[in-house]
């Protein structure tokens, strides 16, 4: 499968980094500078969770985030204005990480021509089977020292969880 022209601008991490930095500045940190491009080898995430939204259209596309549980809990507390001592429930975790995938996916969608509708976010501890799909972009960011991943996929078939 060739990369469709509508998604070509997003095969470079710069627009995705800008989207993520804007998200973290406005919704998480309240100030710029805490999210940056990851350097070096891709990190190994402990107890990873995956959140994604699909964009329908001429080519169905998936925008997926991956984070370790501890980092995801810190993000949840920041996004939901919780105290650091508050216990993060699975429901709050899924809401917060799902909302982050939704915001990143919506902003990615706005950068391409002829995008379709955005799906409801899915959050799971299992990595979805993307073995038959085309990875357009996979990149990692650091947030306050912890890694987060973002990937963009052209979907070639329908997936179950």
Image: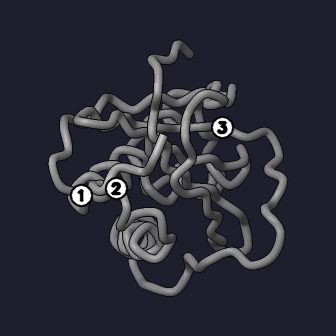
Name the spot of residue 128 as percent of width and height, x first.
Answer: 62, 27
> In the rendered view, would you say 108 is above or below 97?
below
Element under disc 1: loop
The numbered mark at residue 89 is none
Q: Residue at left 79%, top 50%?
A: 45
In primary-sequence order, the first of circles 1 and 2 is 2
Element under disc 3: strand
> In the rendered view, would you say 105 is above or below 11?
above
Say if mark 1 contacts mark 2, CB within 8 Å. Answer: yes
Neighbour tally class for label 2: few under 14, some 14-19, many 20 plus, Cα within 10 Å: many
Neighbour tally class for label 3: few under 14, some 14-19, many 20 plus, Cα within 10 Å: many
Q: Is residue 40 visible?
A: yes
Name the spot of residue 110 as percent of width and height, x first.
Answer: 21, 57
Q: Label 1 vs label 2: CA separation?
A: 6 Å
In primary-sequence order, the first of circles 3 and 1 is 3
Neighbour tally class for label 1: few under 14, some 14-19, many 20 plus, Cα within 10 Å: some
Q: Quadrant of residue 50?
A: top right
Q: Observer-nearest residue: 117 or 146?
A: 117
Q: Residue at left 79%, top 39%?
A: 47
Q: Residue at left 48%, top 40%?
A: 1
Q: Residue furthest top?
A: 160
Q: Residue furthest bottom?
A: 33
Q: Observer-nearest residue: 87 or 33?
A: 33
The numbered mark at residue 112 is 1
Q: Residue furthest front?
A: 2
Q: Observer-nearest residue: 148 or 134?
A: 134
Name the spot of residue 131 as percent of width and height, x first.
Answer: 66, 29
**Mark 3 sits on what residue?**
49
**Mark 2 sits on what residue?**
7
Q: Is residue 29 visible?
A: no
């Amino acid at each position: 499968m060739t990369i469709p022209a509508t998604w070509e601008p997003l095969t470079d991490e710069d627009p995705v980094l800008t989207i993520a930095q804007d998200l973290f500045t406005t919704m998480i940190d309240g100030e710029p500078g805490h999210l940056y491009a990851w350097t070096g080898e891709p990190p190994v995430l402990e107890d990873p969770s995956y959140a994604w939204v699909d964009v329908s259209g001429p080519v169905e596309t998936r925008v997926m985030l991956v984070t370790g549980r501890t980092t995801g809990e810190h993000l949840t507390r920041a996004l939901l204005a919780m105290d650091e001592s508050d216990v993060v429930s699975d429901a709050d975790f899924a809401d917060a990480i799902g909302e982050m995938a939704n915001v990143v996916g919506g902003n990615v969608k706005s950068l391409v021509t002829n995008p379709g509708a955005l799906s409801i976010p899915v959050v799971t501890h299992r990595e979805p089977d993307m073995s038959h799909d085309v990875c357009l972009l996979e990149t990692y960011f650091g947030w306050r020292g912890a890694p987060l991943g973002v990937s963009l996929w052209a979907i070639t078939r329908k997936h179950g969880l």
